[in-house]
Amino acid sequence: MRMLLSSFVVLLLSGLCSAGPATVPPKIGTCWAMGDPHYRTFDGHYYSFMGNCTYIMTKNCHVDKDHPAFEVQAKNVEDRANSQVTSVGMVTVKVYGVNIDIVSSEFGLVRVNFQLWNLPISLDNGKLKLSQSGFSVVLETDFGLMVQYDWLKFLVVTMPSSLAGKVCGMCGNFNGKQDDELTTPSGSLASNVVALGKSWRVSDKGGDAYCRDECTGQCENCESGLVKHLEREIFCTFLTDIMNGPFKNCHAAVDPKIFHENCLHDLCRGEIMKTYICDTLQVYTDACQRAGIIVYNWRGIAHCRE
C-alpha cells in the first residue's frame, strides 16, 4: 500500500509541477478532471468544460501487440442545487475485454461487467488490478495505465511514455505539444472546448438522452473587477499566501497556481459553490501531504466543515 501511494504521488506531482510545455513527452503523462470540472491534459493544457454527458477522457488510438486497446470515460453530472455546475459522477474503464464502472454513490465498491465487487480485485492473471488507497479507488494495468477516482469528483489518469502520441480524447494526445490539444476524433482541431466535448461524447451511453455539452445560464467568466475583489477573499488568497497561509510550506513542491485559478472560477458562481471550493482545497491538501509536507488547519478559516 505504501508503494502504491508513493508511486501515485510521483505521478500526480509530475503533472502538477510542470513548468510549461515540453518538446519531448515526459516520462509519465498525467491528466485530470476535478471540481467544476477543470481539466488538465497530458501535455499540461488547462481548460474548464461544463457538459453533463459521458465523454472519452482517453483511449488508445494506435492499438498494436505491445499497446492493447483501452478506453477511459467520464460521466459528468449536474449539481442538484445548481444546474450550471457539473462534476465527474462516474468513471468507466474498458480494457482487456472487461468493463469497470466506478460510481460516485458507491464508495468502496466497483462494478465489474455490471456486477458490484468489493476491493481489492485482480483480474486476467494480474494484468488488471483495482485497490483502495485512502478515499480513492486505484485501477492499474500491466502496461502502465493508472486511473484514480475519489468516488466524488476528482479523476486522475496517468500513463507511461510508451503511449506518448498514441492516445486521444479529452486528455489530448500526449505528444509534448499544447497547440493541438483540441484535436477531435477526425483529426481536425475543434474551435472551442464545447466543440471538443461534443466530438468526444459517448453516443450510446444510457441515461444521456437529454444531456448537453454546453453550459446554460450565467456561465461567463468573472469580470476583471470582480476577479480582483475575489482575490482578496479568504477562500482563494491563502492558496498563494506564502508567508502566512496554511499551505506556505507546500508551494515549492506543488504549484498552487492552477488551484488558485480554479478557486476563483468556482467562487464566481456564488455562495452555493463553497462546497466545491472546499473540495478543491482538499485536493491540494492531499497532494501536499502525499509529498510529505505538513499543511496547517484551513477548514476553519475557509468555513469548510471538518
Image (cartoon, helix red, strand yellow):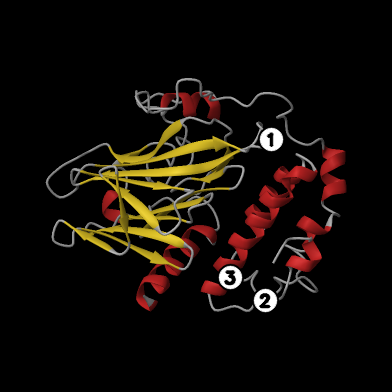
Observer-nearest residue: 67 or 122? 122
- The quarter of the rendered structure image containing the N terminus is bottom left
Estimate the x, y position of residue 71 in percent, counting from the top left: 30, 41
Q: Residue 249: which numbered mark, if any? A: 2
Instruction: Please tell me whether residue 126 is drawn above or below residue 42 in the rendered image.
Output: below
- The quarter of the rendered structure image containing the C terminus is bottom right
> Is residue 16 something that shows in the picture?
yes
Q: Nearer the viewer, mark 1 or mark 2?
A: 1
Estimate the x, y position of residue 86 in percent, counting from the top left: 59, 37
Q: Residues under labels 3 and 2: Cα distance?
A: 9 Å
The residue at which mark 1 appears reads as 82
Q: Nearer the viewer, mark 3 or mark 2?
A: 3
Observer-nearest residue: 194 or 154? 154
Q: Regarding mark 3 in the picture, which secondary structure is present there?
A: helix
The residue at which mark 3 appears reads as 288
Q: Residue 157: which numbered mark, if any? A: none
**Mark 1: which amino acid?**
Asn
Asked if the residues shown at circle 3 and circle 2 are in contact, with their CB atoms under 8 angstroms apart, the answer is yes
- Residue beneath the point at 77% across and 70% down: 245
Q: Earlier in the sequence, mark 1 or mark 2?
A: 1
- Residue beneath the point at 62% across and 42% down: 36
How many badges with numbers are in the image? 3
Asked if the residues shown at circle 1 and circle 2 are in contact, with their CB atoms under 8 angstroms apart, the answer is no
Estimate the x, y position of residue 157 in percent, counting from the top left: 40, 52
Q: Earlier in the sequence, mark 3 or mark 1?
A: 1
